[in-house]
Image (cartoon, rainbow, N blue to C red):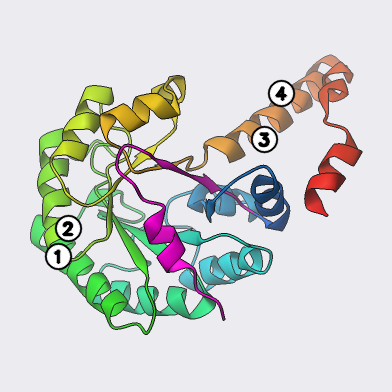
Amino acid sequence: MTHSAETFRALHQKGDPLLMVNVWDRGSAKMMQAMGAKALATSSAAHAFTMGRPDGGNVTRDEALAHAQEILSVATVPMQGDFENGFGDTPETCAETVKLAAEIGLAGICIEDIALPTETAYDFDLAIERIKAAAAAAKDLRHDFILTARADGILRAQYDTDEAIRRLQAFEAAGADCLFAPMPPDMDALARICAATTAPVNALVAGAFTQQTVTDFAQAGAARLSLGSSLARMTHRVMHDAALRMFSDGQFDFLKNGIRSDTIDALLR
């Protein structure tokens, strides 16, 4: 099995952010690679959607690993697993999740500091112990592996930017390779987060942050950009709006906007 974590690590450059594209099946992975993606990631929300479930603790670790393995079968670039809270509360569970993710060929995973499905923040000390255990497991591997520690309290309205920075600094000290606090209040807050840590910082391109450019994120100090479920939600929007036209209005004109099949076929070959 080929691991590409060394390549993945080298792509994390502060001020020159890597665009890591979150995909949800082999087709989306092949298409994004063909169009220039240098790294891929799964998306817990997009994966849950493919299984007819809402996001947030509704997918098991075995299902997430199988899903990632399917995409890895066509991946030619490094890939990260979006593995929610590590699929359990204990530090030991997080460590085991790292080992299992590495075994299937993922270049890294991210682990959140939010308990699921309650969406409450873990106690500070427990949050640090979880990352410490995961980082130790990663260091024990025979190959490189990128552990991203997520402070999700801003996103979940559990704590503010100052607490996110406190946690990220502790996560870095505990051995995390990359840091991530999704959806800070604004770009100034993102810049504060990037300046407060030495490890590379991931920024989520979602919501108001979709109005920013790669250059904007670079100036803020980000080393990596991820899309989360943003790209998948675009496909959901198309399905939703087409269904409204069909079932509510009896109209099919929306379908004329579909991309040509030969364009997609060329990207998948």
Image quadrant containing the C terminus: bottom right
Contact flag, marks 4 and 2 (Cβ < 8 Å): no
Q: Which residues are magenta?
A: 1-24
- CA distance separating discs 1 and 4: 46 Å
Tell me which label, 3 or 4, sits earlier in the chain: 3
The amino acid pointed to by label 4 is Asp
Q: Residue flagged by tag 1: what amino acid is it?
A: Ala
Q: Which residue is under mark 2?
A: 171
Q: Are marks 1 and 4 in contact (CB under 8 Å)?
A: no
Residues at discs 3 and 1 in contact (Cβ within 8 Å): no
Q: CA distance from mark 4 to mark 2?
A: 42 Å
Compared across the picture, whether 227 is left or right of 164 comes to right
Q: Amino acid at mark 3?
A: Thr
Q: Which residue is mark 1?
A: 174
User: Is there a contact, CB below 8 Å, between mark 3 and mark 2?
Assistant: no
The residue carrying pointer 1 sits among few (fewer than 14), some (14 to 19) or many (20 or more) residues within 10 Å by Cα, namely: some
Q: Which residue is mark 4?
A: 241
Horizontal side of 124 relative to 90 (left or right) equals left
Say which element carries label 1. Answer: loop
Q: Nearer the viewer, residue 80 or 66?
A: 80
Using the numbered discs, state the Cα–Cα distance from disc 3 to disc 4 in whole angstroms.
10 Å
- Residue at image x 57%, y 81%? 1
Please state which of the two labelled residues, at mark 3 or mark 2, is closer to the viewer. 2
Element class at badge 3: helix
Q: Secondary structure at mark 2?
A: helix
In front of the other: 109 or 241: 109
